[in-house]
Image: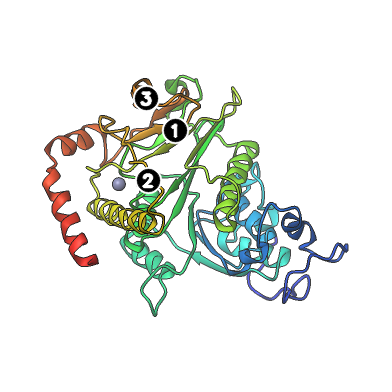
Amino acid sequence: MSVQQPSSQQAPSRPRTEKLSDAVVDTNPYSRLMALQRMGIVKNYEHIRSCTVAVVGMGGVGSVAAEMLTRCGIGRLLMYDYDKVELANMNRLFFRPEHCGMTKTDAAAVTLAQINPDVALEPFTMNITTLKGFDAFKASLTHTDTGKSRVDLVLACVDNYEARITINQVCLELGQIWMESGVSEDAVSGHIQVIIPGDTACFECVPPLVVASGIDERTLKREGVCAASLPTTMGIVAGLLVQNVLKHLLGFGQVTRYLGYASLQDYFPTMAIRPNPECINPLCRQSQAAFKVKAEQEAALQAASAPEEAAPAKADLHEANEWGIEVVADEPSGPAASRAAAALPQGLEYSMPVASMDASNLNRDAVESNDDKLEDLMAQLNAMSK
Ligand SMILES: [Zn+2]
């Protein structure tokens, strides 16, 4: 089998574009995208060229998400995977038989450079879940001068718990917003979730939520039976993910905090998950305290600039809601709605990870946790910000 060589040996398909044009001519690769601006959906489409996105995992969701971002003209794309393309991947989109034997990152770089030479591509062939991989992953996301994150968004398109925990930890350390995605092992459901350190639940705040397919789990997990996958479900989840990315980066529409997809019923549950004040990750608790301080400062500033408009006190409906899960639905506010908030939307359930974190762990920590610690920390942060 002939193996296509990676790298820049191939001539680019067209010259690079200096400035995006909205000219409606057949030779303009951006005419349809710039039309979003003319139609009033997006204020400044060209902003996408200054954005950097990291896609972790170049499988059935990640490779398609990377292609979508490339076709949309994202400025810089970092891609992570350690696997090679195999014939068993051909039931999915993006990779082709001639890529077999190449690393997914190299194969993707070759294809994406041809599709849009304006995108700066950075392939990283690495396993982020090893100790060395963790450091290398974090370093690759970090600006060498400032020590801060150099990307606008990290997309988790991985298929295992360890990789998600790694991404969660690195993003907490960098204060980096990320979006999680997943497709079920029976290939018929999936989800996307936005994680903003301190503002939303991190990946360790609550047990991960999955969309129930309605199929008995026991029929799924048999010895020697590999996970199923469909190009349809993976393509849909990649589309939902990148749509959310575009809304977030270009500031249009509503960025969805959690969106599930149950294909058997064509059901899309949506919700918001607030951070757990007793999260087992100390960095998450620190982020929550810092976020609260920042929000209070912003609220004070707003109140000072508009004193006549008394800002309504933000009611905390979720005191009794252990994991701060807020169901986004057209329900009336009030006591009944707050009781309903404790329940998950129909079709969603917790997925208990096999290893370290389980519900008893979370509950035990929640019971033993000392609120004073959080208050102390907040007082310290308050003092620092004065
Ligand atoms: Zn957390």
Q: Is residue 38 visible?
A: yes
Secondary structure of residue under mark 2: loop
Q: Is mark 1 within 8 Å of ligand 1?
A: no
Q: Position of residue 61 (x, y in %)?
A: 57, 47
Quarter that holds the N terminus: bottom right
Marks 1 and 3 close (CB-CB < 8 Å): no
User: Furthest residue to the right?
Assistant: 26
Q: Secondary structure at mark 1?
A: strand
Q: Nearer the viewer, mark 1 or mark 2?
A: 2
Q: Is residue 191 left or right of residue 288?
A: right
Residue pointed to by mark 2: 311
Residue 9's place in the image compared with 98, above or below, is below
Q: CA distance from mark 1 to mark 2?
A: 37 Å
Marks 1, 3: nearer the viewer? 3
User: x%, y% of residue 330?
Assistant: 50, 26
Q: Which mark is residue 210?
A: 1
Residue type pointed to by label 3: Gly
The residue identified by callout 3 is 334
